Amino acid sequence: MRWLIVAGGTGGHLFPGIAVAEELQRLGREVFFVSGTRRIEKTILKDRPFKVYELEAEGFLGRSVLDKFRAGLKMLKAILKADQIIKTLNPDIIFATGGYISFPVVFAGKLRKKITALHEQNVEPGLANKILSRLVDKVFISIKGSEKAFPSKKVVFSGNPVRKTILTKKPKEHKGLGVLILGGSLGAKFINELSVEIVPRLLEEFKDLLIIHQTGLDEYEKVKAGYAQKISKSFQERLKVFPFIEDMGWAYSQVDLFLGRAGATTLAELFAVGLPAVFIPFPYATRDHQKKNALRVAEKGGAVVIDQREATPERVLEVLKDMLKDKKKLEEMSEAMKSFYVPFPERIIIEELERLHNV
């Protein structure tokens, strides 16, 4: 059976698609992938064991009339190119995990009467997925609550697929506690600037603390220079700074606490490894979906949520210090995070769609 996976924009869309593609290849299926042309997409998809096709598409919301017109032209070209890809590959199933790139492929696939499906990672779905949900055969959701936005007969609760490398525990390389700072695959300017202020103070107070920080590709040099000015050489060996972390299984295995944004795929990975979190949701996310994601987790005791406007260095430092000093609390929060985890979501997706194909 031949599958076409569609994902783009950020790691939050790409990694669930990659997880499904990896499981399909393990099962002996033919897999092809469609993504965008951005640097982060090329970085994440580099050297993957499946053919990747590229499309260029943009969003419409919050843009000028001229920019909307240009985006419309790009979308039309993307639909035509997607149609050619589908005609050439003739996939049995098209599975989209989000990003603007999903629209042209799903739309073209529907015109060619292919089995199509969406995966929604957030509590609050994006506009593209709401529109496409009317066209596709199935809509898979990650967090209960988002089903209200979709046609009820199409919804399947699957959870959010995560990369298998994350589920493999790696040896811990240090004796003390660890903190992972992550803004998502694109990085987060606010998180990075905040971290440069608080990390030196954390390293000074907690003598065995290890901090791992993914800055994003564009901010790496700036953040690295900021740390170099503020952190003495004796502390620098306990700070690992990366533009992008390929082996997240290693990173999660080193740490006991997370600080960063509340994107859906980040949440799914934290659920899988049971890592407590301090979330500072991106305040400009569509329909404030990051805050809604984070609050759902906080309600069960897995995370602390701090609004960005309240996330001063002093406030965030206070929260982190209190949590790092209370190992029992961290253990309780870890169990709360694990309660969200859905084992083998990619299998639920594959079995559901292949059953539909065989009907």
Image (cartoon, helix red, strand yellow):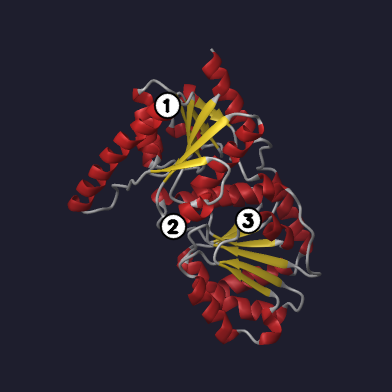
Residue 131 visible in the shown view? no
Q: Is residue 92 above or below residue 227?
A: above
Q: Identity of the amino acid at label 1?
A: Val
Q: Mark 3 or mark 2, which is nearer the start of the sequence? A: 2
Tell whether 178 sits left or right of 141.
right
Tell whether 78 sits left or right of 282.
left
Q: Which residue carries the number 2 mark?
A: 39
Question: Which of the 4 quarters of the picture holds residue 126?
Answer: top left
**How many numbered markers are drawn?**
3
Residue 136 visible in the shown view? yes
* Cβ–Cβ under 8 Å for marks 2 and 3: no
Q: Is residue 339 above or below residue 113?
A: below
The residue depicted at 76 percent of the width and 52 percent of the height is 169
Q: Characterize the local packing of mark 2: few (<14), some (14-19) or many (20 or more) Cα atoms within 10 angstroms.
A: few
For the view shown, which residue lies furthest in the right direction?
A: 175
Name the spot of residue 187 as percent of width and height, x first.
Answer: 49, 63
Q: Which residue carries the number 1 mark?
A: 136
Q: Secondary structure at mark 1?
A: loop
The residue depicted at 62 percent of the width and 84 percent of the height is 231
Q: Characterize the local packing of mark 1: few (<14), some (14-19) or many (20 or more) Cα atoms within 10 angstroms.
A: many
Q: Which residue carries the number 3 mark?
A: 303
For the view shown, which residue lies furthest in the top direction?
A: 359
